[in-house]
Image (cartoon, helix red, strand yellow):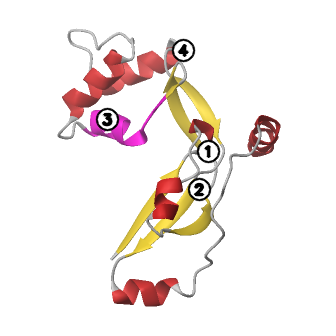
Amino acid sequence: MLIHAASDPEAGHVGRVYAALSGAHRGISRPRIVLRAGDRTISERTFSKIRLGERGMDGAITQIVGLGLPGPGLREQPETWLRRLQTEGLLTRHRTAGLFTYCFELTRSARRNGRTLPRLPYPKTLPDVRCRSQALALCT
């Protein structure tokens, strides 16, 4: 069994807890596009629950409304509501730098297979603001 975890350097996280728990630092993920309400990033899982009408959709809508955004209209479909929030500029797209990725090999076979993967030194500090800005500029 293998568990993956990630920490977001833009949010000030380098994965110290993952390092303390002996998670293998595997590198940095690809940059990605996220949606934000102001300066708060909303997880893609929250949006997928709403788009797919999955269990937890009501809680996901409540979470977004709790950030100060208007709720869906009386007969407005949740997916239409999300598009409206983007059109009105209340949800904005943001390109992030990659996340630090960690891996926990929990079984003997996972540990055996993990030996062939690179295990990098743990990141100790966050890149300084200039480096992060330059990294973001390179990603766009």
Label for residue 100? 2
Q: Secondary structure at mark 3?
A: helix
In the image shown, does 140 or 2 lie closer to the viewer? 2
User: Which callout, 1 or 2, points at the residue further toward the start of the chain?
Assistant: 1
* 117 relative position to 127: left or right: left
The part of the chain drawn in magenta is: 41-52
Say what amino acid the circle numbered 3 marks: Arg
Residue 92 vertical placement versus 5 (above, below)? above
Quarter in which the C terminus is drawn: top right
Q: Residue at x 26, y 15 (%)?
A: 76
User: Which callout, 1 or 4, points at the residue further toward the start of the chain?
Assistant: 1
User: Which callout, 4 or 3, points at the residue further toward the start of the chain?
Assistant: 3
Say what amino acid the circle numbered 4 marks: Gly
Q: Secondary structure at mark 1?
A: helix
Give the number of marks. 4
In the image shown, does 138 or 89 lie closer to the viewer? 138
User: Which callout, 4 or 2, points at the residue further toward the start of the chain?
Assistant: 4
